[in-house]
Image (tube, grey):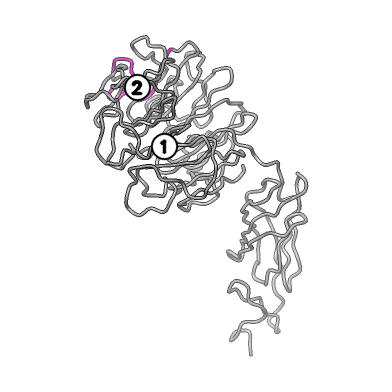
Amino acid sequence: MSCARSLCGLLWVAVAAACSDGTGPAPVATVTGVSPDHGPLTGGTVVRISGTNFLTTIDSVRVGSGRLKGLVWMSSTSLRGTTPTSGATGAVDVTVYTTGSGSSTCTSCFTYTLPVTWISLTAGGNHTCGLASGGAAYCWGRNFGALGDGDWTWARSAPVAVAGGLAFASLTAGDGHSCGLTSGGTAYCWGNNLYGQVGRGDTLVAFTPVAVAGGLTFANVTADYDHTCGVTTNGAAYCWGLNALGRLGDGTTTSRTTPAAVAGGLAFASLAAGGLHTCGLTSGGAAYCWGYNGYGQLGLADTVSRATPMAVAGGIAFASLAAGGLHTCGLTSGGVAYCWGYNGAGGLGDGSTADRSTPVAVGGGFTFAGLFAGEHHTCGLTSSGVAYCWGWNGSGQIGFPPDGTPRTTPVPVAGGLRFASLAPGGMHTCGLATGGAAYCWGYNAFGQLGDGSTNERYGPVVVVDP
């Protein structure tokens, strides 16, 4: 039978080996590069191998001394697989072995590194940032400056280093911007700056970290949609960015491109920026909120917006606060969770979808060690590290396949992992496992889950190493 009428040689992933029945030898395959070009010693990095003439039967691919796992032919110029483990750090060769065309090696094309140990995570609207041991910051997902890598690339599906080499003690992510705080209390921000939320004194996009103006020393910083707030070491609160409906708390609705003092002279221990509002917690556990209140998210027993801090009704003493898109939650020192505000998606967790303008207890009788709010969903973490989430689940952000029905009381996140902290975002959620590995789940169109893909995930998937 002629080559034109039949397949010649072995089949591999439905691709015929090139024929050599008189029509000429098969072209020689070559390897030109590997992406990403680095990964941890533990292996597990999904890599794409680029080259030419991947037309013959591929026997195997070796990365250093180990064989690439899950080898898949993508095209005549691309192969994909997962790196094996390695016994040492450093650069190794990548070799493709073929049937009939010999082998091709890309010298020192992949570098094995020590695995990253994450110490904290923060999730924004469509991006995520993580802090590694040593203070190095990485971000992934939708970019336009929010990732801080100095690049115009639209999105990243794996962590990239924030430019500048700064060592941070904490990170916070808004909708399109991010901020970091050094151990010395200096705040830096980067990303979308249309309303001055970067705090530099202008409205130009910052593609790399810039110092927040004013020379203030902050104890913590928090960001959400289009504004940022921070508490100084002496408890004074400042906010900057968009000030529609008074979310900056300075008694006006004028947007600010540099930090403006929150009115009232209260001393706060921490702040929590929500989508259109902000809340603060005093050292005595009293909660105050300000900004948009159309759904009762200020907790004042009404729906009137405020431009200055107002005490949350009920007199409950909280140990921490978490602000979502249109709702707020608080956790008492005894681990009892309360929420208030918008509840159409079940984010308050009280078993209903009725909005609440004062705190209501989260259902289920759980005792939580941590409470975290996303746009329209909320998550709690028990002292043993078990994660529960509730609210909207249109993309699997509360940890199981979406079925069109929000969950109005806490449900466990799939997978049985134990977490040290959680970070809900717009329509995705991330968690820091007790061993330092990072996991994310939910909406992933911009790569905000950091698993190297843009596929939606309905349970935790590990964030790949930078």
The amino acid type found where label 1 is placed reads Phe
Displayed quadrant of residue 264:
top left
Please give the name of the residue rendered at 72% of the width and 62% of the height, measured from the top-left corner.
Answer: 96
Q: On the rendered structure, is 216 left or right of 30?
A: left
Task: From this view, report whether residue 53 is shown above or below residue 415.
Answer: below
Within 10 Å of disc 2 (Cα), the crowding (few <14, some 14-19, many 20+) is: some
User: Residue drawn 47% across and 47% down?
Assistant: 441
Q: Which residue is mark 1?
A: 366
Give x and y (percent) for residue 43: 68, 50
Q: Nearer the viewer, mark 2 or mark 1?
A: 1
- In this rendering, the answer to whether 298 lies above or below 417 is above
Q: Is residue 246 magenta?
A: yes
Q: Which residue is mark 2?
A: 316
Region of the chain picked out in magenta, as a range:
236-252
Between residue 10 and residue 401, name the one nearer to us. 401
Identify the image quadrant of the C terminus: top right
Is residue 370 covered in magenta? no
The location of residue 1, given as percent across then percent down, is 64, 90
Residue 465 located left or right of residue 197:
right
- Image quadrant of residue 437? top right
Residue 447 x/y as whole percent: 49, 47
Q: Amino acid at mark 2?
A: Ile
Q: Nearer the viewer, residue 374 or 139?
A: 374
Alpha-carbon distance for marks 2 and 1?
A: 17 Å
Q: Are marks 2 and 1 in contact (CB under 8 Å)?
A: no
361 left or right of 397 in image? left
Q: Secondary structure at mark 1?
A: loop
Which element is circle 2 on?
loop
Asked if residue 285 lies left or right of residue 186, the reply is left
Earlier residue among tags 2 and 1:
2
